[in-house]
Amino acid sequence: MIEIYTDGAASGNPGPGGYGAILKSGKHYKELSGGFRLTTNNRMELLAVIVALKALKAPQQQVIIFSDSKYVVDSVEKGWVFGWVQKGFKDKKNKDLWLQYLQLHKIHQIKFKWIKGHNDHPENERCDRLAVAASQDKANWQIDTAFEAERNSASKLL
């Protein structure tokens, strides 16, 4: 069983953002993080899950993901995302990331567990620190291309 802990952060929402993830299995431990110049908290929460799952070295892993994001946990555990697929993600945000997640969902056995954020859970607190630090690290910011393109095209319609 692989344990994954994730968190996302955004200042301004949208604004600079970051994600943090911890992967644990037996004696193995790995931390991942990244920051973006313009994104949303929900995108970073979901991207943390995606990046962590992509870091797994073999398919068909049994994975439990601990997240403080009701958006991510409920979307999968309550099956909402599968309904969104059937409706072509009509009026839903973050389609690009959900499609990435769904590809990973097919190759691993994934369960989610919601944990209360900022509640002294050691791994959740560490993921939060990783996400916030990455969101503030301007020198290493990436561009959330899909988000910025969608935002730019939406502003042109106004």
Image: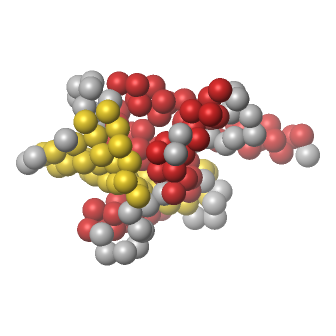
Q: Residue at x 37, y 54 (%)?
A: 113
Of all residues, the one furthest to the left in this rendering is: 27
Q: Which residue is drawn at 55% across and 60% down?
A: 10
Image-based side of 50 in relation to 10, left or right: left
- Residue 91, how many percent across, how many down? 75, 40
Image-based side of 117 in relation to 151, left or right: left
Q: How many labels does the image show?
A: 0
Image-based side of 32 in relation to 12, left or right: left
Seen from the viewer's position, the closer of residues 99 and 145 is: 99
Of all residues, the one furthest to the front in this rendering is: 78
- Residue 24, how many percent across, how many down? 20, 48
Q: Quadrant of residue 99?
A: top right
Q: Quadrant of the N terminus?
A: top left
- Residue 22, how many percent across, how many down? 28, 51
Q: Residue at x 41, y 58 (%)?
A: 114
Q: Which residue is drawn at 42% across and 47% down?
A: 48
